[in-house]
């Protein structure tokens, strides 16, 4: 969801477009997970069963599909574990666990 990063750039001091573009280029070198029918259907089911927004459920499904261990998001509960994936809010100041 590189487009999400570029569009939002939610920081205390938003990134300048050229800086954000450079960061997107760097992240684009990471493994790519394509959204397909199976992922959309899984996201719909997770949206219904866990009361997540569809978009959050889709991001979660993509993270699970690529085998991620951490999902950085401010939209889900910090510290929550979903099928071995730990949700972390990068904007939350927390003490080391």
Image (cartoon, helix red, strand yellow):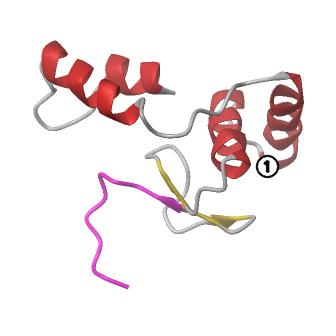
Q: Secondary structure at mark 1?
A: helix
Provide the residue designation for mark 1. 50
Q: In the picture, residue 51 is in which quadrant?
A: top right
Rendered location of residue 71, percent (x, y)? 52, 53
Main SS, magenta region, reads: loop
Instruction: Look at 29% across and 72% down and name the residue there.
Output: 94
Looking at this view, is 31 or 7 the one in front?
31
Instruction: Look at 82% across and 26% down and name the residue there.
Output: 40
Q: In the picture, residue 2 is in which quadrant?
A: top left
Rendered location of residue 83, percent (x, y)? 75, 64
Mark 1, other Cα within 10 Å: few <14 / some 14–19 / many ≥20: few
The answer to whether 71 appears left or right of 25 in the picture is right
Rendered location of residue 78, percent (x, y)? 49, 62
Quadrant for the C terminus in the image: bottom left
Instruction: Look at 55% across and 39% down and name the residue there.
Output: 31
Looking at this view, is 80 or 6 the one in front?
6
Instruction: Look at 47% across and 39% down and name the residue there.
Output: 30
- Asked if the stretch drawn in magenta spans residue 92, the answer is yes
The answer to whether 75 appears left or right of 15 in the picture is right
- Asked if the stretch drawn in magenta spans residue 73, the answer is no
Rendered location of residue 66, percent (x, y)? 66, 48
| Magenta region | 87-97
């Amino acid at each position: 969801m590189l487009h999400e990063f570029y569009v939002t750039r939610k920081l205390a001091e938003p990134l300048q477009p050229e800086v954000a573009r450079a960061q997107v280029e760097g992240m684009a070198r990471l493994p790519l997970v394509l959204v397909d029918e199976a992922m959309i259907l899984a996201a719909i089911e997770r949206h219904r069963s866990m009361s997540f927004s569809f978009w959050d459920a889709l991001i979660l499904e993509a993270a699970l599909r690529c085998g991620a261990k951490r999902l950085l998001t401010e939209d889900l509960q910090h510290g929550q574990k979903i099928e071995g994936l730990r949700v972390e809010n990068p904007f939350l100041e927390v003490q080391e666990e």
